[in-house]
Amino acid sequence: MDFNEAEQRFRWLEDQRARGVITMEQYRSELNLLRLTDAHGRLWMLQERTGQWFVQDGGQWRAASPGDARQPAMASPPAPPAPPAQSAQVPEKGGGCGKALLYLLMWAVIWSVIGIGVFVIWGQDEPAGLLGVGLAALISLVFMLGSLSSAWSGTIEELRVKEERVTDDEGNSYVQHVRYAYVRQDNGKIKKTPAMPKWQVGDRLVKQRGEAHIRHYPART
């Protein structure tokens, strides 16, 4: 993402905020992703609502124009200081770490209950059942940690419905229709992900690290 793309994205976000399509928390979270680092290693950010660029200089924020820095810009992670402007505000933290701990706690509780239930019903006669529960819990943990550690954002370019053959627990095989969204990420790559019912082409999707769900921002109508 370069400075021009960040400014274009800011105008879209400001419109969504003004029309009440997104909350202030969502607005600030998205705005926080628009910070850039130029070829000299200087960090730039857009002030909320005004769109004024601020650059971090000597540990302090000051209003400035990107100028020649527009060409070699690259994405950079957010930094905690906020610019010393009257209406500038520090973006709110997403609480990703706390949510990740909550997901882990829920995982531990659910699988503990399942393990206890299996032990009470079959544990004494079929101890292998507990091993099966432990293996299933481990597999689910790996998938959950993989989901929590990922972070991406992009725009839905296409929606497709595909036929997939699945087999249930009783060995019965059948075909189900699955709707997928093909998302062009901010880095230019295409990501395929199962689509939710309300997703449409042009909508913005954001997956933050430490969260299991994908944030959905409808396209401007």
Image (cartoon, grey):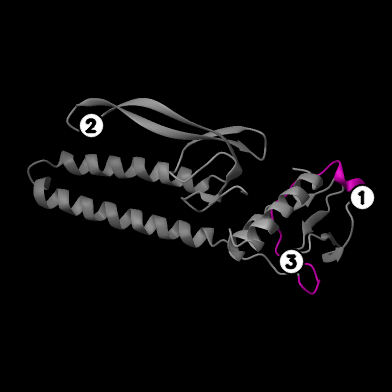
Q: Examine the structure image and report whether residue 119 is included in the region drawn in magenta.
A: no
- Left/right of residue 33 with respect to residue 71 in the rendered view: left
* CA–CA distance in space, label 1 to label 3: 23 Å
- Range shown magenta: 67-87
Q: Position of residue 171 (x, y in %)?
A: 19, 27
Identify the residue shown where x is 86% and y is 65%: 62
The N terminus - image quarter: top right
Q: Nearer the viewer, residue 107 or 155?
A: 155
Using the rendered image of the protein, determine whether residue 99 is visible from the camera's viewpoint: yes
**Residue 34 seen in the current view:** no
Work out whether 31 lies above or below 129: below
Q: Residue furthest right?
A: 68
CB atoms of marks 1 and 3 within 8 Å: no
The residue at 81%/44% (across/down) is: 73
Q: Does 80 appear in magenta?
A: yes
| Mark 1 neighbour class, 10 Å CA radius: few under 14, some 14 to 19, many 20 or more | few
Q: Which mark is residue 168?
A: 2
Magenta-drawn stretch, dominant element (helix, strand or loop): loop
